[in-house]
Image (cartoon, grey):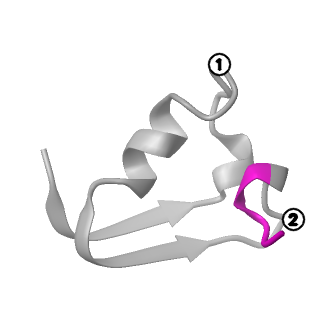
Amino acid sequence: MEFDGVVVVEPRYFVRQEEFAGTLYTSLTRANRELVVVHSKPLPESLTQR
């Protein structure tokens, strides 16, 4: 399933499963046109720029 727009709220609180595979990864990869990540807490290390 894919969507034109996806909003992910507080990705830090997603359940971590096998490094990065799981609900967060699925949520981040379903957007066709626009992805919005809303957070007030620090982002998970896997989402920060390197």
* 13, 25: nearer the viewer: 25
- Residue 13 position in % (x across, y down): 71, 42
Amino acid, disc 1: Glu
Identify the magenta region. 46-50
Give the vertical position of 38 relative to 46 (above or below): below
Give the vertical position of 33 relative to 20 (above or below): below
Q: Secondary structure at mark 2?
A: loop
Q: Which residue does the image show at 68% across and 28% down from the upper left?
A: 16
Q: Quadrant of the C terminus?
A: bottom right
Left or right, 25 with respect to 45, comes to left
Q: Which residue does the image show at 66% across and 58% down from the upper left?
A: 10
* 48, 39: nearer the viewer: 48
Q: Identify the disc placed on residue 18.
A: 1
The alpha-carbon separation of the residues under discs 2 and 1 comes to 21 Å
Q: Residue 15 falls in which quadrant of the image?
A: top right
Residue that label 2 marks: 42
